[in-house]
Structure formats: structure tokens, C-alpha cells
Image (cartoon, rainbow, N blue to C red):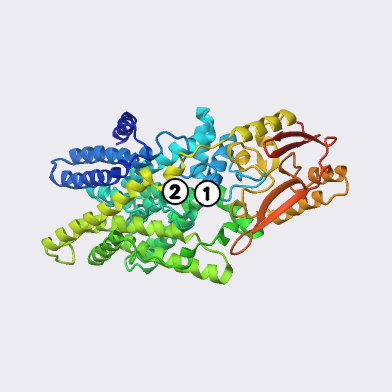
Amino acid sequence: MLIVAAVGTLALHGVLVALHFRATDEVAPAIGPIWAALMIAIAVAAVLLDRRLAGHLHRRMAVAALAGAATALAMTPLMAGLLGTRQPPFTILRGDMAFRTEAVTRFAATWHLDDYTFRGLHSFYPPAWFWLGGRLANWTGATPWHVVKPLTIGTVGAALLLAFCLWRMVLRPGWALAAAIGSSLVLPTQTEAIAHATEAWYSPYSCLVAICGVAWLAAAWTTVRAPGDRGRLALLAVAGAALALTYDLLFVLLLAVLLALATVSRRERRAALQRAGAVCLGVAVLTAVFWVPLVLAIAGGSAAQGHYVRPDFLRVTTGLGGPVGLTVVVVAAVAALALTLWRPASQAVAALLVATIAYQLASVATLLLAHQQLQPHRAVTMLWATAGAAVAVALPTLGLGRTTIDPRLVAALAVVTVGATFGLGAAQGTTQATGPFTRAAHAPVDLAPSTEMARFITTATARRPQAVTVASTDRALLVTRPFHGFLALGARYAHPDAQVGRRIGVLRAAAACPDPACAARTLARTPFGPVDALVLTRTPAGLRIRTDRDGFPQPVPVTITFRPGLLDRAHWQRHDVGADAVLVRRGAAG
């Protein structure tokens, strides 16, 4: 599987280069239907080979080769759309991609789970994806932001591959691949307005958990219901820890569903609860290095990201009433699962569908009552992925066990589901190759000013960027260099225990100082450590920095102006870059 995936990826990349594919070409949208048809063909071929090939080893080898081909093919639309640019979707400086790039840049400078902005704080955002990207940049010597694009593309293939491996613990090889492909083909598409986008592959790490999470839950529930097999329980705990460190909110939902299934089970309830508890404990122990500091930080602060509000956060998506293809897939999934609910795998998939809807309801409640939402759009992506796998999970046993179904009805259900999946997959493939986020990645980004700023700061301080704290009005400086920020890129991206209000108060106190010595002293002796450098915008009224502090439903903009002469050359070394002034505090040299 891995060999075919590697060779296939190189071959497909070579074909795209030879075709001179560009996201802006008129024929580029045609890649979506072609891609979806090929992915479905692989799924159908896997099921047929699994049924007809003689010999268990032959079936496993054939399906494994097809899984490798599907892994390579899954990455093709995004690989094609980003051909000719080094940037990920939506560029490295816009939207959530700015903090993602900043996190990769941080982990390229350290293997510790540090916050991507603030010195002395632990990572509060699930670090696995960013840590892997940063370490890859460190090990290869690559520029950190150059890693974000291939890491995003690679995550698409990794999600399908891992989902297939997890489904293999529950289903026959052919159906396992069909379930993994089904989850991958029905995901939401990009939209023109990011404020209304259900993000899917724009958020690759959470999308990976959405696709693999349903497979993990089915494998875990099937395993905890059966006695013995401690090795499989341990394997599931390790896989679960990896998913939890990739995106924790969705994985907490998976654990809740697993425990709920064990609690309501009529068969060996006590034993099932013990085994489920053992898996949960294993995951908790393996991820304690992340969640223990996180709990302490939340206890002492506030999760600012929970204050972010979009119109769709007050709606609950069930899959009905949206795209026609999704409605068909959801209806088919509910029918197939209802007829096979005696199977553990169907129970897990059905329970997760219900849980993703309940999660959205809980998010609406917390938003209205406590002004904190639970990132419900991630659960929507998991709902789509779960519905996409459902029919492939149920279809092998329709007509078996406790029900008798006319084979013609089973065939009709399969045909309808395949048709709807093709439509959703075609839209997804097209938007990955030519959608607004993908096209935005081709916009040039001018990093020359931030490069000049970084060079001046590191030369003046004689220290590495990761040893310097900067209060900067230039986002690119913090995104592409591992400087510690005195302020966050935005209030929504701040660590829960960052005390952004107090940090703003320090800058205001310095700006209100009566003389330059007071301003320099105030910035050198802050409760959060010294501010070594400033990057401020030059205005007729003085040097200005703009930031914001957390608020609901919108952050509150803050502007601080240092009057002319307050940051004088007796206390600061200065270098002007474009409209900005870069100041390094004298005495900040290492």
C-alpha cells in the first residue's frame, strides 16, 4: 500500500507538471468529475476483487494496492490546484492560515510543546499537525512556511490511508476501502465568503480527525464488546492519542460516544465499560503532556476562540435540506444503518451521526448562555464524513442476520448512494483544484519587508529570533520568523492564559510615560518579560500599533500611539522599513 501510494503520487505529480495544470485554466474544473469517477471506480473494484479473488492473501494484496492508488489519487485535486505556488490554500497570511503557519514556524525552532506566540506558555491548540510540520522543516532545513503546502496535501492522503487501516479492523478489505473513500468524497466545498465556509480541507488537521474518527469509533466499539485482544485495545489507544493531539474537540466527542455505547449496551455492560475505560485512560495518559497544561490554562483564563461567532453557528445541520447529494447520502445512510443496527459497526456509525447533531445543539446552547461556542463547524464536517461511510459499512450485511431484504432494493440503494457520492465528490474535486481558497494561494506574498525587519532585529540584539520578544504591527514577521510576540496575531488566536488585556495595558502605560526613560523602563520590566523590539507604523501623530482585545460577538479594536520623541535613539536603535519603524531596545542585546 505504501509503495503504490508513493509511486502513484510521484507519477500523478509528474503528469500534472507535464500538462502545465493551473488552477485558473478554463478546463481546470473538469478535474472534479474525472477525479470522483476514478475514486469511485477504485472503491467498486476493491469490493469486486474482495469477493471474487481466490485466496485470502491475494485479496489483501490486491485491495492494499488499490488503497495505495486511492491514497495517491485523493491528493491529486489539491496537488493540481496548488501547482506553481509554495503557499497553502488562502495563503500563509490570511485567515486561520496565518496562525497555522506561525505554529509550524514555532515548532521548527523547538521540539517543546510551546505556544506559537507567547513565551513561557504551553501549547493550547492541538499541536500534532503543526509539530510534525515544524519538525519536518527543522530536519530537512526547509523554510518553515514552505512546509505548510505539502503537509496540507499529504494530510489528504494520510486521512484516507489511516481511515482504511482502521476500517480494516471492522470490515473486509474491499468494504474498508469503500468506506474510507466514501468519507473522503462527500466533504464540504470551499465557499466564496470565508465567514460562511464549512472548512473541510481548509482545516486539514481537523478534517483528518473527522474522516478517521468514525473508523476509529467503529473499531473501538467492536473491540470493547469482545473479550480479550488487549493488543488491539492498546493499538486503538495509541491511534486515539494521535487523533486527540491532532484535534481534541472532535476526539472528545468520539470518547463520549464510545462510553455512551458501552453504558447502554445490554451485552456484558460491565466488561465493555471497563475496556472502553481502559482505552480512554490510555489516551489520557498518552496525551497528558498536552491536556494537563491546557486545563490549567483554561482554569486561569478564557478560551477566546470560543467567542468567535458566525451566522451558521446558531443553526444545526442534519444533512437534510442542504446539497441534494448530501440529503440522498444521509437518507440512504439512515435506512441502511436502521436495517443493520444489530451490528456493532452500524451502531457506532449511527450513534456518531446523532452525536454530531447533539454536539451542534450543545454549541448553540453554550453560545447563547455563556457566549462560548464549541467549534460546531468541525462537527458538521464529521457528520458529512460519517454519512459518507455509512452505506459501505452497512451494505455487506444487508439481507443477512435479523432482516431479509430484496437484493434489488440493496442494489438500488447502492446505485443511488454511488450517484450522490459522485456528485458531491465532483464538486469537492473541482473546488480543491480551482476554488477561491486555492486560487488565493497563487496571490504573491511580499516578505521582503519582514525579512529586512528580522535581519535588523537579530543583528541589533545578536540573538536568535526565538530568543527575542517583539510587539509587532507586521503580521508576516511573527508568521514567518520564530520571534515571540508580545501581542497575538488577533484576540481570537490568543492563548487562554495570555492576559491580553494586561499586555495592552503595559503598552498603554509606556505610551503614557512622561519621558523616554520611563517608556524604555516600562517596556523592559513587564510582568511577561522584557519587550526587546517594536515594529510600529509611522504616522504624523507618532508611532502607532493596532491590536484588539477579546469581546463578544466581535473583538474590540485597540490603537496605541507613542508620541514623537518618546522612543528616542538614546534608548532604542531604529531602522525604518517602508511605512514601519523597527526599534530595538538598547540593552536587549544578548
Judge whether 577 appears above or below 439 on screen.
above
Q: What is the quadrant of residue 316 in the picture?
A: bottom left
Q: Which residue is mark 2?
A: 202
* Relative to 424, 413 lies left or right: left
Compared to 60, does 428 lie above or below? below
Point out which mark residue 96 bears. 1
Quarter of the image with the C terminus is: top right
Q: Quadrant of residue 380?
A: bottom left
- Residue at coordinates 21% horizontally, 45% vertically from top-left? 41
> Dot 2 lies on which element?
helix
How far apart marks 1 and 2 lie (CA) works out to 9 Å
The mark nearer the N terminus, 1 or 2, is 1
Judge whether 443 appears above or below 280 on screen. Answer: above
Marker disc for residue 156: none
Image quadrant holding the N terminus, namely top left
Q: Nearer the viewer, residue 293 or 418?
A: 418
Secondary structure state at the residue bearing disc 1: helix
Instruction: Find residue 574 and report its horizontal and vertical position in percent.
Output: 76, 34
Residue situated in front as seen by the camera: 354 or 235: 354
Q: Mark 2 packing: few (<14 Cα in 10 Å), some, or many (20+)? A: many
* Residue 84 in picture, x, y percent from top left: 42, 33
Looking at the rendered structure, the kind of residue marked 1 is: Asp
Q: Amino acid at mark 2?
A: Tyr
Q: Nearer the viewer, residue 207 or 227?
A: 207
Q: Is residue 437 left or right of residue 537?
A: left
